[in-house]
Image (cartoon, rainbow, N blue to C red):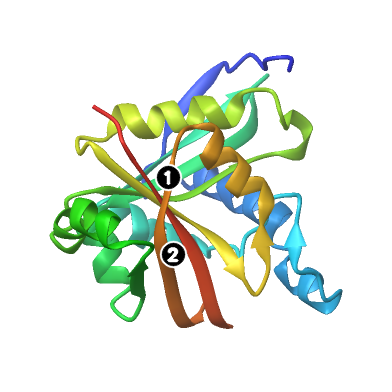
């Protein structure tokens, strides 16, 4: 793997329209779920998003206990990460049910989860031009550096289509499968099931 030189890591701000538009451009590169569903795929080896955010949605996200970073390589957007506090995540997803994979995992994580005592990695994506060059790892490092809670959570789509690329990424970082989210409808997609990953980083 040949590393990419990251020349800048910009903190995303609601008023920084050019940076937010760069994030939306990257999101659109990965908003391919509809085409995958049309092809009756059950799993994708490349990362994808359910849908891209609108500018006002990104601004609201960042204004409500969310944060993010835009990576630049050779002065061009190379990827981004967006995250939020656990409390903010729970407020945004009141109808998402969490089922634990085991009673031991529930005992270990449920109290912190229900109290919002965690940080949630909402999205992480890297442009195709710099895939497999360490950019996602750098963005994850920024997510960890910015956070204040040891417990980190992320969710990877499992149904209607499994996101294999994201599964491989989080497992390579040592995240553990702890349960699954079920949402009856998420951004226009029905019966969404995601695998929940957790890692304590102190």
Question: Where residue 107 sits: x, y (%)?
Answer: 19, 57
The quadrant the C terminus occupies is top left
Between residue 114 and residue 56, name the one nearer to us.
Answer: 114
Q: Which residue was labeled with disc 2? A: 56
- Residue shown at 77% from the left, 75% from the top: 37
Vertical comparison of 132 with 175: above or below = above
Q: Residues within 10 Å of mark 1 (few under 14, many from 20)?
A: some
Q: Quote the CA–CA distance across marks 2 and 1.
A: 33 Å
Vertical comparison of 30 with 182: above or below = above
**Left or right: 144 with respect to 115?**
right
Between residue 162 and residue 52, name the one nearer to us.
Answer: 162
Asked where in the image residue 192 lies, by quadrant, the reply is: bottom right
Between residue 149 and residue 65, name the one nearer to us.
Answer: 149
Q: Which residue was labeled with disc 1? A: 176
**Left or right: 182 with respect to 36?**
left
Mark 2 or 1, nearer chain start: 2
- SS state under label 1: strand
Q: Is residue 83 visible?
A: yes
CB atoms at circles 2 and 1 under 8 Å apart? no
- Residue shown at 74% from the left, 74% from the top: 34
């Amino acid at each position: 793997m040949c590393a990419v030189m990251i020349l800048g890591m910009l903190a995303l701000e609601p008023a920084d329209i050019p940076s937010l538009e760069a994030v939306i451009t990257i999101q659109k590169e990965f908003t391919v779920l509809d085409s995958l569903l049309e092809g009756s795929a059950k799993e994708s080896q490349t990362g994808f998003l359910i849908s891209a955010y609108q500018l006002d949605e990104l601004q609201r996200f960042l204004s409500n206990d969310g944060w993010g970073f835009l990576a630049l390589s050779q002065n061009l957007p190379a990827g981004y990460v967006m995250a939020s506090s656990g409390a903010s995540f729970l407020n945004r997803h009141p109808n998402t049910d969490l089922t634990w994979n085991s009673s031991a995992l529930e005992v270990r994580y449920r109290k912190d989860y229900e109290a919002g005592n965690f940080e949630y990695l909402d999205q992480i994506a890297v442009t195709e031009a710099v895939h497999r060059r360490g950019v996602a790892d750098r963005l994850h490092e920024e997510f960890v550096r910015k956070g204040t809670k040891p417990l980190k959570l992320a969710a990877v789509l499992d149904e209607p289509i499994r996101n294999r690329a994201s599964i491989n990424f989080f497992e390579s970082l040592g995240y553990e499968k702890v349960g699954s989210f079920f949402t009856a409808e998420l951004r226009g997609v029905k019966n969404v099931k995601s695998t929940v990953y957790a890692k304590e980083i102190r």
